[in-house]
Image (tube, rainbow, N blue to C red):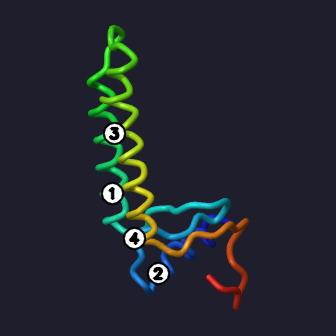
Amino acid sequence: MFEGFKEYYKNNPEGYWFKRKVYGWGWVPVKWQGWVVIGVWLVAVLAFAFTLDENSPPREVAFTFILPLLFLTVLMIRICYKKGEKPKWQWGLPKEGEEE
């Protein structure tokens, strides 16, 4: 079972950073550049999260965490669109001869 997934993600002649998920809608990083993007996103989210404490007022939470999180997530989705396969809903590995 896992061999099929591994082969699907390795089959990347276009050099995409992100390939379509096998189940559902979205992407999975398949090249080191994609993993770097995910890592930078995660570090940035954690950095903004650590600016908050239990005494942070709601306005501060909105401007120092929620808005940057939304911006980072939109930027991540944009990068995935630009550097990844065209997203579509799929449930399982594509069949032979099926459009990928």
Q: Is residue 27 above or below residue 14?
A: above
Pair 1/3: label in front = 3
Q: Quadrant of residue 58?
A: top left
Q: Are marks 2 and 3 in contact (CB under 8 Å)?
A: no
Q: Is residue 50 left or right of residue 19?
A: left
Residue found at x 29% / y 41%: 43
SS for tag 1? helix
Residue found at x 50% / y 75%: 85
Residue that mark 4 sits on: 17
Residue that mark 3 sits on: 68
Task: First in sequence, mark 1 or 4: give its number.
Answer: 4
Other-residue count near label 2 (Cα within 10 Å), few / some / many at <14 / 14–19 / ≥20: some
Q: Is residue 89 left or right of residue 43?
A: right
Residue that mark 1 sits on: 37
Q: Are marks 1 and 4 in contact (CB under 8 Å)?
A: yes
Residue that mark 2 sits on: 12
Pair 3/4: label in front = 3
Q: Hey, what amino acid is under mark 2?
A: Asn
Pair 2/3: label in front = 3
Q: CA distance from mark 1 to mark 2?
A: 18 Å
Q: Position of residue 39 (x, y in %)?
A: 32, 50
SS for tag 3? helix
Other-residue count near label 3 (Cα within 10 Å), few / some / many at <14 / 14–19 / ≥20: some
Q: What is the number of the mark on residue 88?
A: none
Q: CA distance from mark 3 to mark 4?
A: 24 Å
Q: Position of residue 37 (x, y in %)?
A: 33, 57
